[in-house]
Amino acid sequence: MSDLRDHKEDKKPNFYSTHITLKVTNQDGHAMFFRNKKNGQLEELMSWYCLKMKLEFHSVRFFFDGTRIRPNHTPEELKMEDGDEIDTVIEQRGGWGLEKSLVLRRKIISFVCLFVNLLMGT
């Protein structure tokens, strides 16, 4: 009888053997911990992190050991171990640059002059 019970218990997967705890850290050093299935995609973890940090999902970049993490990656695929750290950075979109800024400023000034002329009736 005990042999049958032992056999049943062996078939039941252990929670700790199927899940992994990951530390997600931002540029300021603030860390959050998440549990994820070892073979589960990281998209849900990434979404939860963005939700809790009040960030747009598409503006945050996730990295593990210098490799960018995609939502469809799994911890197994990236060879992550329990307690590993994921780094996050906010994507910085480049500015317009001086040339584009001057062109835009000229267009705005031209539009304002045209609008004022229309209002004045000239």
Image: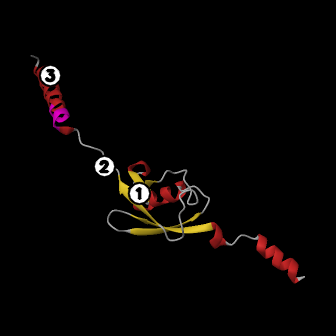
Q: Give the spatial CA distance, label 1 vs label 3.
A: 52 Å
Q: Quadrant of the N terminus?
A: bottom right
Instruction: Please tell me whether mark 1 sits on a helix, a strand or a loop.
Output: loop
Q: Would you place residue 114 above or below residue 37 in this image?
A: above
Q: Helix, strand, or loop for circle 2?
A: loop
Q: Is residue 68 left or right of residue 19?
A: left
Q: Give coordinates of residue 77: x percent, y percent.
A: 57, 56
Amino acid carrying label 1: it is Gly
> Dot 2: within a 10 Å radius of its alpha carbon, few (fewer than 14), some, or many (20 or more) residues?
few
Quarter of the view holding residue 39: bottom right
Helix, strand or loop at mark 3:
helix
Outermost residue to the bottom: 2
Percent coordinates x, y for residue 18 in the rendering: 64, 67
Measured as percent of width and height from the top left, residue 76 is found at 58, 60
Closest to the observer: 109 or 7? 7
Query: Residue reaching furthest right?
Result: 1
Crowd around label 3: few <14 · some 14–19 · many ≥20 (10 Å): few
Decide: is 15 above or below 108: below
Q: Crowdedness of circle 1 by 10 Å Cα count: few (<14), some, many (20+)?
A: few
Which mark is first along the chain, 2 or 1? Answer: 1
Mark 1–mark 2 Cα distance, whole angstroms, equals 18 Å
> Residue under circle 1?
66
First to last magenta residue range = 98-102
Of callouts 1 and 3, the N-terminal one: 1
How far apart in space, not on screen, are marks 3 and 2 (Cα)? 35 Å
Check disc 3 and report the residue beneath it. 114
Residue at point 48%, 57% (across, down) = 46
> For this view, does 94 lie left or right of residue 102?
right
What amino acid is labelled 3 in the image?
Leu
Q: Residue at x 45, y 58 (%)?
A: 51
Task: Name the residue carrying label 2.
Answer: 92
Q: Residue at x 40, y 53 (%)?
A: 60
